[in-house]
Amino acid sequence: MAEILKPTDENLRILREFLRLGGLVAVPTETVYGLAANALDADACAKIFEAKKRPSNDPLICHVASYEALEAFCETNEASKILAEAFWPGPLTFVLPKKDTIPSIVTADLDSVAVRSPNHPVFRQLIEGCDFPLAAPSANPFAYISPTRASHVEANLGDRIEYILEGGPCEYGVESTIVDLRDPTNPKILRYGALPVEKIENALKKRLPRPTPKLDQEIIAIAPGSLPKHYSPRTPLELRASTVSERELIESDQTTAYLLIRKPKSARAANIHWLSEKGKLETIASSLFAKLRELDDAEYQRIIAEEAPELGLGLAINDRLRRASFR
C-alpha cells in the first residue's frame, strides 16, 4: 500500500530522487491531487497510463516551476506571456507547440503540449527542487471522480503506487482551466476549470471561443480531461437544469441521493445532501468531488444533482457534472 509522506525537507528530497529515477508520486495541487512522473522520461510516463488505466490518446499536463522554464519544452508567445504574468502560478493550463524534449507519449503523439505552473505550496516545494518538469494528470483511476484529499488517492490507487505526498484538502476542488495558445492571435478555451473564463478574457482583452456541451473532436484530441465520460461515480447520476422542488425532496425515495447546490429550506432526510449553505460557487466547487465520492460509497441506486448557475466557476462545476452524468 502507498505510504503517505508529510512534506518535510528529507521526504521531499527522497521524492525528487524517486521521480528522477522513474517513479510515480501522487502530489497535491491547488486543483486536485495529481499522479506525477518525470515528464522527460517516457518509461516513467508510461507508468502513469498503466496505473490509471488511462487511454494513450489522452495527453498529460506538464507542470513547471516557472514560466521561464517553458523555453526548453515548448514554443511560447505573447499571449502565453500575458496570461502567465496575470495567473501563474495558478490553475491555468496552456496548450502550446511542443519541442522534441517532451516525449510523444506525454502529448499523445501531438505536436502540442499542455503546461502549467501550480500554486500549491507543497507542490511548489517539490517541483522547485526538480530539474525536470512533472507530467501529472489527476491521481485517480481513469474516468472516476478526481481526488481532492490524500485519502482519496490512497483508496483508489494506493495498491498501484508507492508514495503519496500529503498536502491537505485541495483549495479549488476542480481541475485547471485549459486555453489553446498554439495560435496566439486566436486563443480558445478548451476546458472550463478553476480559473473563470471571464478573467482570462479580461487579461487578453478579447472574448474567446468557448467549449459547448456538444462534443468537439478537436478539443477531445488536444485537451487533457475532455472525453465525454469523466469524473464519474459508479452510481448513475442524473443532472437537473432547474432547482429540485421541496415537494420532490420530501416525497423522495431513500434509495435516491439528491445533491443540491445549496442547503434546502426544510427537507432534512438522510438522502438530501448539499454542496454549500448559501450557494457560493467557490464552496460548491471545492466540495463537489468529495461529496460525489461520499454518495458513491453510500451505495445509493442513483444520484440526482442540480446544475450551478452558468457563469464564472459555475461553468466548470456544470462541465464536471455533465461528464459525470454521461452514460
Image (spheres, rainbow, N blue to C red):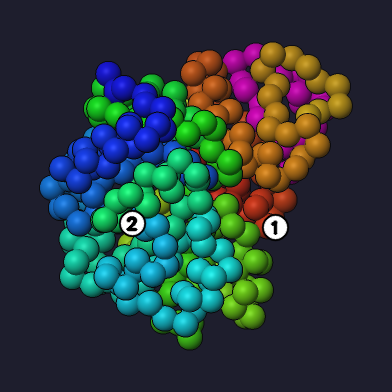
Outermost right residue: 265
Q: Which mark is residue 311?
A: 1
Q: CA distance from mark 2 to mark 1?
A: 28 Å
Residue 68, quarter of picture: bottom left
Name the amino acid, label 1: Leu
216 sits left or right of 291 in the view: left
Query: Circle 2 — which element?
Result: strand
Q: Residue at x 33, y 49 (%)?
A: 129
Amino acid type indicated by mark 2: Cys
Q: Is residue 43 above or below residue 274?
A: below
Q: Nearer the viewer, mark 2 or mark 1?
A: 2
Question: What element does badge 1 sit on?
Answer: loop
Residue 9 vertical placement versus 316 (above, below): above
Q: Which label's residue is closer to the chain start, 2 or 1?
A: 2
Residue 293 in sight here: yes
Of 231 and 303, nearer the camera is 231
Residue 242 within the magenta-colored segment of the rendering: yes
Residue 275 at what x, y percent from top left?
68, 33
- Which region is colored magenta? 241-262
Q: Is residue 175 magenta?
A: no
- Residue 183 coordinates in the image, percent (x, y): 41, 81
Q: Percent x, y for residue 10?
A: 32, 32
Q: Residue at x 75, y 42 (%)?
A: 280
At x 72%, y 51%, the residue is 309
Residue 26 occupies which quadrant of the picture? top left
Q: Say which quadrant the C terminus sits in.
A: top left
| Residue on which the image places disc 2 | 62
* Disc sitting over residue 41 in the figure: none
